[in-house]
């Protein structure tokens, strides 16, 4: 029975890679120490993604340190581990400009901020998960292609993802079959 439940969970995971695609997300800045955030409406493969944030007067006067925590997710449904970005391209005390390089197969980028307040306290915005998501100009959400780039709907791209999904599904089925047979013959 446990084997059946585990295989069901695995197959559900394989069928739903990253949820509904193409909708950017952003959280409210209220209570964050940030006044404004500017960034591109979409990320572009193999290019830099730039963000500009403006601190409120209290945070900038107290020399609050800001860490931009990013996570890039690619078209196969894999999300890389989050990375801390605390080196800013420009810092004038109130405005910070940061940049990260985007992968060739990026579907979207997630991010959040960690505020290192002058009194030594740290606070994440949001407290868990990510508060912002910006989709690529060409993305695959596990079911369909989308984005502003017309070339992203190419047959080559679809076959690459479909091949990956088929291989993963076949491996899952054989793994479940192997576990079932090994348990049956060991009894």
Image: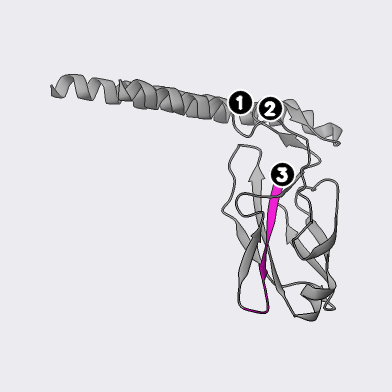
Task: Return the x and y of residue 13 as percentages of the image width and height.
Answer: 52, 30
Instruction: Count the marks.
Output: 3
The dominant secondary structure in magenta is: strand
Q: Is residue 133 above or below residue 182?
A: below
Q: Nearer the viewer, mark 3 or mark 2?
A: 3
Residue pointed to by mark 3: 108
Looking at the rendering, which quadrant does residue 38 occupy?
A: bottom right
Q: Say left or right for 181 vs 60.
A: left
Task: Return the x and y of residue 98 as percentages of the image width and height.
Answer: 78, 66
- Res 174 seen here: no
Q: Nearer the viewer, mark 3 or mark 1?
A: 3
As measured in the structure, the alpha-carbon distance from the residue carrying label 3 to the one carrying label 2 is 17 Å
Residue at 73%, 60% (x, y): give it: 100
Q: Say left or right for 140 vs 168.
A: right
As measured in the structure, the alpha-carbon distance from the residue carrying label 3 to the one carrying label 1 is 19 Å
Which residue is nearer to you in this view: 27 or 44? Answer: 27
Residue pointed to by mark 1: 162
Which residue is nearer to you in this view: 170 or 126? Answer: 126
As measured in the structure, the alpha-carbon distance from the residue carrying label 1 to the one carrying label 2 is 6 Å
Local SS, label 2: helix
1 and 2 marks in contact (CB < 8 Å): yes
Local SS, label 1: helix
Neighbourhood count class around disc 2 (C-alpha, 10 Å): few under 14, some 14–19, many 20 upward: some
Task: Return the x and y of residue 33 as percentages of the image width and height.
Answer: 77, 66
Q: Is residue 156 above or below residue 118?
A: above
**Label disc, if present, on residue 158 of the rendered structure:** 2
Looking at the rendering, which quadrant does residue 29 occupy?
A: bottom right
């Amino acid at each position: 029975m446990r084997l059946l439940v585990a295989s069901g969970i695995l197959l559900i995971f394989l069928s739903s890679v990253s949820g509904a695609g193409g909708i950017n997300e952003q959280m409210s800045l209220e209570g964050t120490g940030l006044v404004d955030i500017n960034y591109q409406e979409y990320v572009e493969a193999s290019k830099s993604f730039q963000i500009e944030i403006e601190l409120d007067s209290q945070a900038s006067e107290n020399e609050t340190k800001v860490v931009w925590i990013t996570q890039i997710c690619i078209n196969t449904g894999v999300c890389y581990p989050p990375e801390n970005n605390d080196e800013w391209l420009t810092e004038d005390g109130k405005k910070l400009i940061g940049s990260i390089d985007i992968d060739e197969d990026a579907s979207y980028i997630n991010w959040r901020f960690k505020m290192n307040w002058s009194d030594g306290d740290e606070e994440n915005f949001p407290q868990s998960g990510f508060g912002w998501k910006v989709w690529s100009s060409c993305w695959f959400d596990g079911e369909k292609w989308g984005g502003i780039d017309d070339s992203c709907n190419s047959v080559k791209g679809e076959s690459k993802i479909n091949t990956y999904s088929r291989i993963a599904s076949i491996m899952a089925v054989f793994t479940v079959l192997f576990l079932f047979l090994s348990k049956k013959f060991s009894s």
